[in-house]
Image (tube, helix red, strand yellow):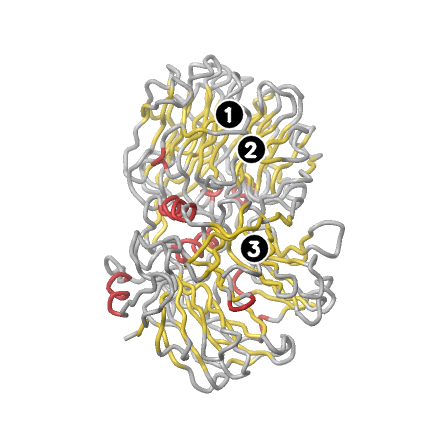
Amino acid sequence: MIRLSRSTTARAAAVTLAALTAFLAPAAPVAAGPARGPLRGPAAPAEFSYLQKALPGRPLPRHAFERAAAEAAALPAVPGRWQPLGPTNIGGRVVSLALDPQRADTLYAAAASGGLWRSDDAGRTFRPAWPDSATQAMGAVAASPDGMLYAGTGEPNPGGGSVTYEGTGVYRSADRGRTWRPAGLRDSGTIGALAVDPRSPHRILAAATGSLYSPGGDRGVYLSADSGSSWRRVLDVPGPFTGAVDVQFDPAVPQRVYAVLWDHRREPDKRTYGGAGSGVYRSDDAGAHWRRLGGGLPAPGPDTGRIGLGVAASEPGRLYALVGGAAGGFAGFYTSADAGDSWSRLPDDARLKQSQSSYSWWFGKVWADPRDARHLHAAGVGLMTSADGGATWTDDHDAVHSDQHAMVWDPRRPGRVYLGNDGGVYRSDGGGDGGWSKAVYEPWTQFYSVATTPQDPGRISGGAQDNGSVRSWGGTRFNTYFGGDGLQNLIDPTDKNRVYACYQYGSCARSTDGGATMTSFDSATTADRRNWFTPVQFDPVDPRVLYYGGNRLNRSADGGATWEPISPDLTGGPGRDTYPYGTITTVAAARDGATVWAGTDDGRLWVTRDLGRHWSNVLDGQPWVTRVTADPRNPAGAWVALSGYRSGSPLPHLLHTADAGRTWTDLSGNLPQAPVDDVLSGDDGRLYAATDQGVFMRTVRGWHRLGSGLPLVPVSGLAYDHAAHRLVAATFGRGFYAIRVPSDTP
């Protein structure tokens, strides 16, 4: 039994291992599947995020993020103000774009987990158009001719690391994003698209995509005739996990509307991104009534995945459909000349097929040039372009960042096109056929980690989703110095030019010149499995000593040049799905040179007191262990952060031991019921916790929100500068923030 001792601190609680095990037991046994290699592409960070945030065998509870955010907002705040540190030039995933019909060169961009932004200079720079206090998870944006702006929250793309942060419905603004009001569909989970009736600015259609994890709720196409004050569902869905992912008015025939439905579901150990409910629908009376289109499109069945629909403005009735398979691959490109009554499948183009990789559900978009119905762009890993109505395609992958999601043509500027992808916002004045320029100010990067150094307060690095490892030196602005999906980053506290960076599944490298040249070292480590975010950590006394966790813990005594395993497999073995479950997720060494802690994704915590000769399993049956932090004053002490949304359960998110794990104290207290993503000890023993809802500081009166000015965005990592009393946070959607912590708070 785990002994969680009573504490004199606020709201400490005793919890038994039996209670934890009973609550965390899978709802039902699941048959084992075949062993496969690690997932790639956007599925991999989605699995990492989902498995970390959900309890084993249980789906994410509906509105979990929103409820925890309300709990966080109710806590008292410690004085101080967070300041943004950038980057402003790297960007991040943009899922929707809209032009202001009343103002030239005014563009709105919806960032996946970074809120809504407005540009008044044709996409060159952006400023906030969304409150920091609201959810930053975005799905769609639309602007009405009467000046009303609409935002749909919750990203519909099921990947990229932000899938667990569902939205809270539709919102509207009458002042171009300065203030917002809720406009319904709170139970939609995610919004795939918003469309304004070109003949009546008060009529709005919303494609409610629904929750990826929970059945029902607001799903399908909804119509509002009063600018979002009320809604009625006009296109129902055939199943509890079918949602509307797109809705578009036909520019050539305004009373004609098209919608795309999509079956998609994430179960505890299975992804189903297709089904019989996936299909294209048409309304001939501005959205009042609908019928499913066939006539050559794939018949309803389990193999139909996400469909991207393109509507040509210059040729009435001309449509294009990019069809994905339920397994994620390319399933055909179709065209129709009669508004979808009949369809022809075009010969498969190798480039277009390749562009969908194995995750066509990440894209699902086709855009037709409003002046030339045969000039097309399609979303893929690269930007795909056709000049002959889809017969042949070229790939503009070298001109823009990978993974395309949004495009809009500017009707005031012939040939001007805006593009949103995983790298941010781009503009072309050549119809999208090259000549792309990237926005220079777009501060919505998704970070997994942060590293700082006491030698230079301005030197910051971190791992960014789909944007590599990013550093603040080596150029005039932030720049990428190691590729892939950036993950663990470290800066040697005694030598600021000795740096370490990793990308997915523990592919790590070291540098002695600040990242100008990198030398890979992961092949020298020993592991059967490595987590998406593989932990690498310094010894707190000698930074030439490092630890690297696969499913076994490795140690280096020469700055990462050579490695040796110092543990057996510390996990319960591999998981049943393609994600490499059964890995070490966090490592921390004490200052005595002999004590090392290691936590795992299958809820185990281990400690060795003799540098790996013997290991003790001191916690078991827990949720994902997100962080273990060694007590700098007591080699037998440690804090352990646990992940998982708990559906209101009082089970702990933060534990402390002072006796090498023999007894534990629950320090969760009045923290929000949300995953704790990081924990660290600052000056005078103060404790800081990073959660999906912000950063909190523990005082004698319990947990307090730390400062003001930090957006409501997940904080994935913390770094502490003891000399400057400065805390630096890595946020998953708004870049880096810093605050000088108070020195006199009790």
Above or below, comparing residue 311 to residue 83 in the picture: above
Q: Amino acid at mark 3?
A: Ala
CB contact under 8 Å: marks 1 and 3: no
- Label 3: how many Cα within 10 Å (few below 14, some 14–19, many 20+): many
Nearer the viewer's eye, disc 1 or disc 3?
3
Quadrant assignment, res 522: bottom right
Query: Which residue, given by chain and number where applicable, does mark 1 sit on?
Result: 149
Q: Residue at x 71, y 70 (%)?
A: 495
Q: Amino acid at mark 1?
A: Leu
**What quarter of the picture does the N terminus occupy?**
bottom left
Give the CA distance from mark 1 to mark 3: 31 Å
Give the CA distance from mark 2 to mark 3: 22 Å
Query: Which residue, given by chain and number where applicable, does mark 2 sit on?
Result: 129
The image position of residue 458, as x and y in percent, is 70, 57
- Mark 2 lies on a secondary structure that is loop
CB contact under 8 Å: marks 2 and 1: yes
Q: Is residue 704 left or right of residue 87?
A: left
Q: Amino acid at mark 2?
A: Ala
Quadrant assignment, res 331: top left
Give the CA distance from mark 2 to mark 1: 10 Å
**Which numbered tag is attached to residue 23?**
none
Q: Nearer the viewer, residue 229 or 614?
A: 229
The image position of residue 658, as x and y in percent, is 42, 76
Query: Which residue, given by chain and number where applicable, does mark 3 sit on?
Result: 729
- Label 2: how many Cα within 10 Å (few below 14, some 14–19, many 20+): many
- Mark 1 lies on a secondary structure that is strand
The image position of residue 200, as x and y in percent, is 45, 13
